[in-house]
């Protein structure tokens, strides 16, 4: 019994992006067909085609086909793309009866890829763990996690014991969360009413303005303990959106690099819109109690170079 697996069957959504087409052509795989029977191993050319189809745009940009050995098997680009390649291969190897040996080989590669040997390391609690635990108890929440130092820097939540399916890792009442609903209930109604006019931006702006006000209140804010747990942006372990461009270059060429730039732009957009709306709100509510209750002072500094 024989089977034919076409390279085109590996294309996600039936379409092959231009970069992938170029890589496939460089290897002589574009439009190729692979004949198989139940005792034949997985053709290396078919595995190469699957890996090229599974690569992200960033991985294809970085990939350089070998000029002297175009038939050489394409190496895995990343764990994620390799998993997608093997899964798509498994789906394309039909009928199964005609591809037993190849399917066994794909299953073995998948098993090797997904086999993880746990690394045991001592748990080091972060300095904020005690404060986080106290805040959790005070808010009526409960959890089976602690705040621990991460080996790569920063901090994260780690289970204190093995969790089973259905166990709650962390449970918090809605009243303990800073959300748009919180902002609506605590900001002056006149300000909330104006921010609601911003439609899709309203919830972002409500939370941003609420956080600005609570930070300005300092120790007088009832959210002081929560705000104290937020990580500063200028320390190790801060979000990539706060990294300098030199630091971002260390992940250049990856999807993460472009995603970080997208997030940074979105944050800049939010802040720009927030400033515009604050000026609008300040103008509409005037200098009365609604604005003064926010405890905010707007200071604008014009950049002479930007006004030329």
Image (spheres, rainbow, N blue to C red):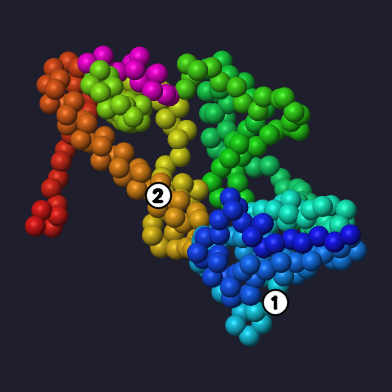
* Apparent side of residue 82 relative to residue 1 in the rendered image (left or right): left
Q: Is residue 31 above or below residue 259?
A: below
Drawn side of residue 286 relative to residue 216, left or right? left
The residue mark sitting in front, 2 or 1, is 1
Q: Is residue 294 above or below residue 8?
A: above
Q: Nearer the viewer, residue 280 or 124?
A: 280
- The reply, left or right, for residue 242 in relation to residue 42 is left
The residue tagged 2 is 262
The quarter of the image holding the C terminus is: bottom left
Q: Left or right of 252: which side holds 116?
A: right
Graded by Cα atoms within 10 Å as few (under 14), some (14 to 19) or many (20 or more), the crowding at tag 1 reads some
Q: Is residue 166 visible?
A: yes
Q: Which residues are magenta?
A: 178-190
Write the residue at 70% across / 33% down. 160
Image x and y of residue 257, in percent: 46, 56
Magenta segment, prevailing SS (helix, strand or loop): helix
Decide which of 79, 303 is in the foreground and name it. Answer: 79
As drawn, which residue projects farthest toward the left? Answer: 308
Element under disc 1: loop
Q: Earlier in the sequence, mark 2 or mark 1?
A: 1
Residue closest to the far bottom: 68
Helix, strand or loop for disc 2: helix
Residue 143, x across and y down, in percent = 64, 25
Q: Name the residue beneath numbered marker 1.
A: 72
Residue 118: horizontal and vertical position, in percent?
77, 48
From the image, which quarter does the N terminus lie in? bottom right
Q: Residue visible at 70% across and 62% down?
A: 6
Q: Is residue 179 magenta?
A: yes
The answer for how far apart the CA atoms under marks 2 and 1 are is 36 Å
Numbered label attached to residue 292: none
């Amino acid at each position: 019994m024989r089977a034919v697996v076409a390279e085109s069957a590996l294309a996600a959504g039936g379409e092959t992006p231009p970069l992938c087409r170029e890589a496939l052509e460089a290897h002589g795989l574009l439009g190729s067909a692979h004949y198989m029977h139940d005792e034949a191993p997985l053709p290396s050319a078919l595995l190469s085609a699957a890996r090229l189809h599974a690569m992200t745009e960033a991985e294809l940009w970085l990939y350089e086909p070998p000029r002297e050995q175009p038939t050489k098997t394409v190496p895995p680009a990343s764990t994620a793309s390799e998993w997608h390649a093997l899964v798509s291969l498994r789906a394309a190897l039909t009928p199964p009866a005609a591809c037993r040996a190849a399917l066994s080989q794909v299953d073995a590669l998948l098993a090797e890829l997904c086999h993880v040997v746990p690394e045991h390391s001592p748990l080091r609690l972060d300095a904020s763990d005690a404060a986080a635990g106290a805040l959790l108890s005070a808010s009526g929440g409960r959890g089976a996690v602690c705040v621990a130092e991460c080996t790569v820097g920063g901090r994260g939540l780690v289970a204190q014991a093995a969790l089973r399916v259905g166990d709650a890792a962390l449970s918090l009442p809605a009243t303990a969360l800073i959300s748009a609903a919180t902002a609506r209930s605590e900001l002056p109604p006149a300000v909330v009413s104006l921010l609601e006019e911003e439609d899709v931006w309203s919830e972002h702006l409500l939370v941003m303005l609420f956080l600005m006000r609570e930070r300005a209140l300092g120790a007088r804010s009832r959210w002081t303990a929560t705000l104290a747990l937020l990580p500063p942006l200028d320390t190790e372990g801060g979000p990539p959106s706060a990294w300098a461009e030199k630091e971002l270059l260390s992940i250049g060429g990856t999807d993460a690099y472009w995603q970080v730039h997208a997030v940074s732009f979105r944050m800049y957009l939010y802040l720009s819109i927030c400033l515009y709306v604050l000026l609008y709100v300040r103008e509409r509510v005037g200098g009365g109690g609604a604005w003064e209750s926010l405890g905010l002072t707007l200071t604008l500094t014009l950049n002479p170079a930007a006004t030329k």
